Image (spheres, rainbow, N blue to C red):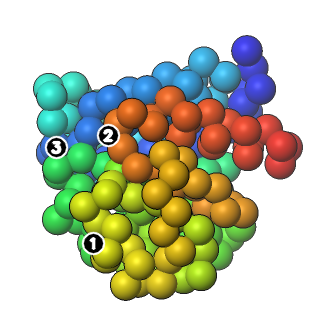
Amino acid sequence: MSALLNKKILIIIAPQGFQDKEYGDTRQVLEEQGAQIIVGSLKLGEALGNLGAKAKIDILAEDANPDNFDAVAFIGGQGMVELVEKEEFTDLARRFYENNKLTAAICIAPMILAHAQILQGKKATVWPEAKKNLIALGANYTAKPVEVDGKIITANGPKAASAFGKAIAKILTSNS
């Protein structure tokens, strides 16, 4: 399938402790449809997942320009818990959103979008333990596995990873 041919998607992960299934399943769904995946984080080199998966970091989050991508997808995991307020990530989310680019996040990572103040009044979901924090930052929590509100996609964890990838693909193909 080549529905996403010529589409470039930035996947952002924590340098340590990203969620292996969320990263792997999302990436696989998008690559199977022809998307080019670029992986970003806070430092270059190799990132390590919670369960031992490894990922090569192609670009620093702070150097990523939304003009060069069709979408950004933030991946959760234990390593992302302490990074949801990290300026490099919240600024990146805000820049993608303000440039009318698809802005997506799964697991704990929707908190990055909330801290970037782009979920106020938007339907969103998140890892259940972060529900109160998401609501406190103005999101309309839906508890769905995957939630789409315009150019924002959120998902609640590893079980939703394939559906998250498919939702990203669907939005990108309907906007081509």
Q: Which residue is mark 1?
A: 86
40 or 80, nearer to the observer? 80
Position of residue 160 in the picture relative to residue 149 (left or right): left
Earlier sequence position, callout 3 versus callout 2: 3
Q: Quadrant of the N terminus?
A: top right
Residue at image location 16% in from the left, 43% down from the top = 17
Disc nearest the viewer among 2 and 1: 1
Question: Dividing the picture into quarters, in which one does residue 135 lie?
Answer: bottom left
Residue extending farthest top: 1
Q: Amino acid at mark 2?
A: Ile
Q: CA distance from mark 3 to mark 2?
A: 14 Å
Residue at image position (34%, 68%) is 131
Name the residue beneath numbered marker 3: 17
Q: Secondary structure at mark 1?
A: loop
Residue wearing tag 2: 57
Q: Is residue 120 above or below residue 129?
A: below
Q: How far separated are the C-alphas under marks 2 and 1?
A: 18 Å
Q: Is residue 92 visible?
A: no
For label 2, the crowd category at 10 Å Cα-Cα, with few meaning under 14, some 14 to 19 and many 20 or more, is many
